[in-house]
Image (cartoon, grey):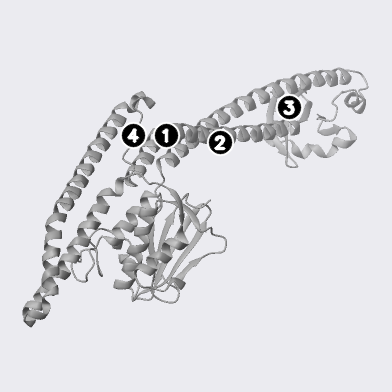
């Protein structure tokens, strides 16, 4: 079941409310107008019928009455028809001789009993008003008035009121959308601020005086961000301080391990193996400390400058004794980008090291562009990365198959975390997918780096 959002629900409520209100008003207006027009038309038809009946009565009140002449003397126009029932015979104009069947028996009984009668009926699917007036014991006068024009008026009125109801409903929906748009604007600002904070911008704050009703929310939000920024900064300083303090004893251990390595020929096999393991672990420990220091410095502002990406990638390949021919620059992509050289150099180094360590070696370093966004892709020919691990692989201290795996291999588990951190500092992101020919493809985006 699809659940509508708050804006959609409020807009729908406004539209339904406006439709119900306008429909009710339209029905009431239609019924009042209909009754008023019908009553007015009935009074008009009655006056005309009684007048015509009086004219016919005068025409018949002679020694030799001429019924046809009396009926022709009536000014009925095209909307009324006159009929006379005299001494059991029906009289009418030439065009009205077939109208006697339209007179209901009940109405004839009332008129023959000496009571005037009025009834609205349909003749040939057309609405008419029938008026019966008794003239004498042997004569009754009937007049049929067409209501066709009045029915057309009702139809036009119904269409107009329906159109008005639809327009009012649309206006209600527009008003609801406008009200929710402005009503939710403070919440949208909170959501935008939360997204920027999640992306690492801890300088984001809400303006408390934007909306008096949301002052408490803005103040609490800013206080929360301040506390979060202080805690993250405290943790980052702690990591940096610890890493920095570890450098001195590590250098001492590295010097001692170097001495042991140089004297390996004077040691027995077990001692030499132990010395080699100690030296390897010290090297790994030093790399871990360096990565921790880089993570601690990752919150520093990005210093963009013109950088020759092609040469930067080739130098990274030369440092690792890799073939420079794997570096590829797309035709429509300039070689010089506006990036932080230190960060991008570490991105390339970590991706190449990761491909060598876990991906059977890199096969391609490709630079391309997507508008003003620079794209770096590093392909390897290893087993690839399972779909369920493609997000967790950029977390800290993650190596191997699953996110909770620690240890194994000679990496620190911070290389790809640094890659993602440096990409985010440029406003981009890091992702991994399958290489068409097999293996993994790591993709880094750097918005605003290509002009």
Residue at 71 percent of width and 24 percent of height: 41
Residue at 33 percent of width and 73 percent of height: 359
Across and down, in percent, residue 127 comes to 72, 35
Residue at 42 percent of width and 64 percent of height: 313
Residue at 14 percent of width and 74 percent of height: 262
Nearer to the camera, 310 or 21: 310
Q: Is mark 2 on a helix, strand or loop?
A: helix
Q: What element carries label 3?
A: strand
Q: Residue 205 carries which label?
A: 4
Reading the chain from its start, which is encountered first: label 1 or label 3?
Answer: 3
Q: Do the residues labelled 1 and 3 touch (CB within 8 Å)?
A: no
Foreground tag (1 vs 3) = 1
Marks 4 and 3, how far apart at CA: 82 Å
Foreground tag (4 vs 2) = 4
Marks 1 and 2, how far apart at CA: 22 Å
Foreground tag (4 vs 3) = 4
Q: Residue 185 carries which label?
A: 1
Across and down, in percent, residue 433 comes to 40, 67
Q: Is residue 404 visible?
A: yes
Is residue 434 placed above or below 451 in the rendered structure? below
Q: In this view, does 107 lie to the left or right of 90?
A: left
Nearer to the camera, 80 or 180: 180
Q: Are marks 3 and 2 in contact (CB under 8 Å)?
A: no
Mark 4 crowdedness (10 Å alpha carbons): few <14, some 14-19, many ≥20? many
Q: Which mark is residue 170?
A: 2
Is residue 185 placed above or below 302 in the rendered structure? above
Marks 1 and 3, how far apart at CA: 67 Å
Marks 3 and 2, how far apart at CA: 46 Å
Reading the chain from its start, which is encountered first: label 4 or label 3?
Answer: 3
Residue 164, quarter of picture: top right
Residue occupied by mark 3? 131
Q: Is residue 278 left or right of residue 153?
A: left
């Amino acid at each position: 079941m699809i659940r509508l959002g708050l804006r959609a629900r409020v807009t729908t409520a406004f539209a339904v409310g406006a439709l119900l209100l306008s429909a009710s008003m339209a029905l009431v207006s239609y019924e009042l107008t209909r009754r008023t027009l019908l009553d007015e038309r009935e009074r008009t038809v009655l006056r005309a019928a009684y007048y015509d009946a009086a004219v016919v009565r005068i025409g018949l009140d002679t020694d030799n009455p001429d019924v046809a002449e009396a009926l022709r003397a009536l000014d009925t126009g095209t909307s009324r028809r006159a009929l006379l029932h005299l001494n059991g015979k029906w009289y009418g104009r030439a065009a009205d001789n077939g109208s006697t069947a339209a007179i209901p028996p009940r109405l004839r009984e009332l008129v023959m009993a000496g009571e005037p009668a009025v009834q609205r009926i349909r003749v040939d699917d057309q609405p008419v008003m029938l008026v019966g007036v008794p003239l004498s014991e042997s004569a009754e006068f009937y007049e049929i008035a067409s209501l066709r024009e009045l029915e057309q008026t009702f139809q036009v009125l119904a269409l107009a009121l329906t159109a008005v109801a639809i327009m009012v409903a649309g206006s209600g929906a527009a008003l609801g959308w406008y009200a929710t748009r402005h009503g939710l604007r403070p919440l949208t600002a909170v959501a935008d601020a939360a997204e920027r904070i999640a992306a690492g911008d801890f300088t984001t704050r809400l303006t408390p005086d934007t909306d008096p009703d949301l002052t408490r929310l803005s103040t609490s939000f800013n206080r929360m961000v301040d506390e979060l920024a202080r805690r993250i900064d405290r943790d980052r300083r702690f990591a940096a301080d610890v890493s920095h303090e570890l450098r001195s004893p590590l250098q001492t251990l590295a010097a001692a391990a170097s001495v042991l390595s140089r004297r390996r020929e004077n040691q027995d096999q077990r001692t030499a193996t132990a010395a080699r393991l100690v030296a390897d672990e010290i090297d790994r420990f030093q790399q871990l400390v360096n990565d921790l220091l880089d993570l601690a410095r990752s919150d520093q502002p990005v210093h963009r400058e013109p950088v020759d990406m092609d040469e930067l990638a080739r130098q990274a390949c030369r440092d690792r004794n890799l073939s420079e021919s794997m570096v590829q620059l797309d035709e429509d992509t300039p070689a010089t980008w506006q990036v932080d050289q230190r960060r991008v150099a570490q991105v390339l180094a970590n991706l190449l090291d990761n491909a060598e360590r876990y991906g059977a070696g890199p096969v391609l370093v490709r630079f391309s562009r997507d508008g003003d966004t620079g794209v770096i892709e590093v392909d390897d020919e290893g087993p690839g990365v399972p779909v369920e691990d493609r997000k967790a692989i950029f977390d800290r201290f993650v190596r191997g198959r699953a996110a909770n795996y620690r240890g194994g291999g000679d990496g620190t588990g911070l290389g790809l975390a640094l890659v993602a951190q440096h990409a985010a500092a440029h406003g981009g992101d890091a992702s991994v997918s399958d290489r068409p020919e097999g293996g993994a493809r790591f993709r880094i985006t750097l918005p605003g780096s290509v002009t």
